[in-house]
Image (cartoon, rainbow, N blue to C red):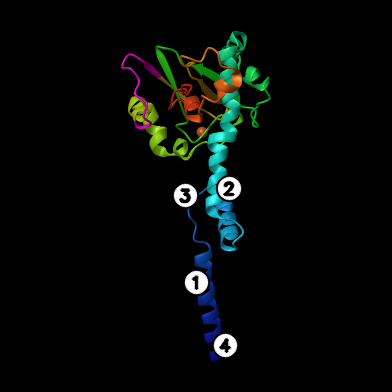
Amino acid sequence: MHEDHETDHHDHHGHAHGHGHFHDHDNRYTDMQARVRALETVLVEKGLIDPKAVDAIVETYETKIGPKNGARVVAKAWSDPAFADWLKADATAAIASLGYAGRQGEHMRAVFNTVDTHNLIVCTLCSCYPWAVLGLPPTWYKAPAYRSRAVIDPRGVLAEFGLALPKETKIRVWDSTAELRYLVIPERPDGTDGLDEQALAALVSRDAMIGTAIAGVPS
Ligand code: FE
């Protein structure tokens, strides 16, 4: 009788310990992030994937594959005034005509940089991003520092990205939502008159379409 009690007690203690351990929640992650992280951990531990390879894939989607769609939209707007007008009037339809549509049916708005005005995109609330044209958002786009400071001190944020705009240039900050996402159309660089759309698209980086950079110049 006494021994049974001891055994029960030990079992219970052991279980309680394990229980606490396995339910050690980390509230930094959403459900989906936690699942992805757990999967990645298991795959790495089993030697099935190299975390560096995962980072490389994510980076490719962030900086290359995704933004290529947006760059094509920008290049067409630079080359085709009628398309640029359509993009200004109804970006959702103009962008969809190239085959890029939001998976959640969100609306798009294209904001055009001019000599006087530079546009910058943020989502102050979370990380709303024009997936259809830019792919995965970069880590910094989701970071609280960018989300709060882009609104309070856009010029300072741009300086940190290495972009120093003339004092006279007005900066407009656009706060994305689940329903409405923005795409910055950078100014067409000088010396690009002879370039076709493909060559023009190569000058348009992801950051130029978020507004933390401008379009590149032909080398
Ligand atoms: Fe958001």
Distance between the alpha carbons at the discs numbered 3 and 2: 11 Å
Of the residues under marks 3 and 1, which one precedes in the sequence? 1
Name the residue at 53% across, 64% down: 22
Vertically, is 25 above or below 122? below
Q: Which residues are magenta?
A: 160-171
- Reading the image, the residue beneath label 4 is 4
Please, which residue is most extreme toward the front here?
Answer: 219
Vertically, is 115 above or below 207? above
How crowded pointer 2 is (Cα within 10 Å; few <14, some 14-19, many 20+) is rated as few
**Dot 1 and dot 4 residues touching (CB under 8 Å):** no
- Reading the image, the residue beneath label 2 is 32
**Dot 3 and dot 2 residues touching (CB under 8 Å):** no
Residue 143 image point, x, y percent: 43, 39
Name the residue at 36% across, 15% down: 169
Disc 2 residue type (three-letter): Met
Disc 1 residue type (three-letter): His
> Magenta includes 128?
no
Distance between the alpha carbons at the discs numbered 4 and 3: 42 Å
Distance between the alpha carbons at the discs numbered 3 and 1: 23 Å
Disc 3 residue type (three-letter): Arg
Which quadrant would the N terminus be assigned to in this image?
A: bottom right
Distance between the alpha carbons at the discs numbered 1 and 4: 20 Å
Please tell me whether mark 2 or mark 4 is closer to you in this view: 2
- Reading the image, the residue beneath label 3 is 28
- Reading the image, the residue beneath label 1 is 17
Residue 195 image point, x, y percent: 56, 16
Specify whether residue 169 is in view. Answer: yes
Name the residue at 50% across, 18% down: 111
